[in-house]
Image (tube, rainbow, N blue to C red):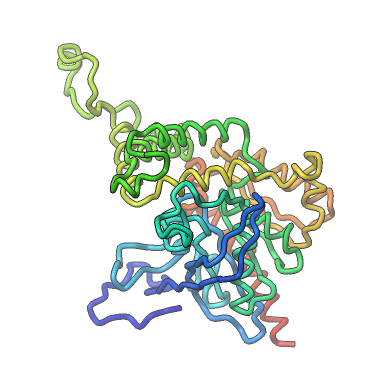
Amino acid sequence: MNQPIPPNFQPLADARSVGVVQAQRMRFDEALPLRSGASISGYELVYETYGTLNAARTNAVLICHALNASHHVAGVYADDPGNTGWWDNMVGPGKPVDTERFFVIGVNNLGSCFGSTGPMSPNPATGRPYGPDFPVLTVEDWVHAQARLADRLGIERFAGVMGGSLGGMQALAWACLYPQRVAHCVAIASAPKLSTQNIAFNEVARRAIITDPDFHGGRFYDHDVVPKRGLQVARMIGHITYLSDDVMAEKFGRTLRRHSSDAALRSEYQFTYDIEFEIESYLRYQGEKFSSYFDANTYLLITRALDYFDPALAHDGDLARALAQATADFLVVSFTTDWRFSPERSREIVEALLVNGRRVTYAEVDAPHGHDAFLLEDPQYMAVVRSWFGRIADAVAQTEAV
């Protein structure tokens, strides 16, 4: 929903932005069964919409977010004009996902810390925050919750479901769980399941949080503290894996923050707890920023959902069988320097879809930015997505004209 622009509002430099947006909230009293065997009721989902839903309700596109993102996909808030949506370069008037042609929905996942019901929310059974008692969630649980939201909005079938990284996993799950409700599926910088190395990175990050003295077994809310040190280390680990070695070398190299000469270096060379290298300064800054806004229990919950995702598991490890029920057309995009979700993982998805005779477009983009490339404005990447969604929009328009 778009808001009127207040008189004192300073517009974005990008005239193609969706402009001022407003988050919306929807409550669900009916229990949502979860894969763990538990269920949750009386939960809320926060979401945003951009563009206009057409009369036939056939131009809706769902954007699924990654680990630390949210429903705030595009635009800005009237009371916080510096808070730009995390995929604002992708979604907006005249952008690859054109809000002049599509009705775009961003949903904050259940269990998140950006408004939807999660570990920070009051547990109806106790009146205290759920904390570690919040039920375990999976990617499939998120998709079922999103489907309920789509039902409430009167959307029977999405023109497209799209996401990057963990969002791409959700898009794949949508195509398998609700094949008749997804016309097109876009999975960017994603994978059919995490590698063992990725699970290992997640576990190290989780241990940093759990072993923080301020964690208190996940009940740190009761102690009015935040396990900041653990969150900072977790985020630093994540940033190392999101960037390519070339980008880190180009941005930071081995530059020291002090010592103007070799003589000075030799005279002061000793072990120190201070920041020495520019890359250290960058990582600490990112960690401190993250710890100021992200919830530790949410981090544990979402990284576990990442670990659990494996649609082939129920099919004896056969990904082709797992994707056999999908009927959508697919766009799969990977980036050459993404070693966290490497191109090889995207090719596994493509090959499994081709076995099933599905229509697949695959783009392997030569970009230097590592995993973070899916958030950036690489010309080749943007052109691929723009062309793909342009064809979808044309097809929707032709259907409307009939």
The image quadrant that residue 186 belongs to is bottom right
| Image vertical order of residue 232 relative to residue 177, above or below | above
Side (left or right) of 31 relative to 22 = right
Q: Residue visible at 33% across and 26% down?
A: 254
Q: Residue visible at 84% across and 48% down?
A: 355
Side (left or right) of 315 relative to 6 = right
| Residue 288 rendering spot, x and y as whole percentages | 30, 42
| Image vertical order of residue 226 relative to residue 250, above or below | below
Q: Residue visible at 78% across and 49% down?
A: 322
Q: Residue visible at 61% across and 73% down?
A: 60
Which quarter of the rendering shows the C terminus? bottom right
The image quadrant that residue 389 belongs to is bottom right
Can I make out residue 384 in this image?
no
Which quarter of the rendering shows the N terminus? bottom left
| Residue 343 rendering spot, x and y as whole percentages | 63, 40
* Front position in the image: 159 or 89: 159
| Image vertical order of residue 282 relative to residue 382, above or below | above
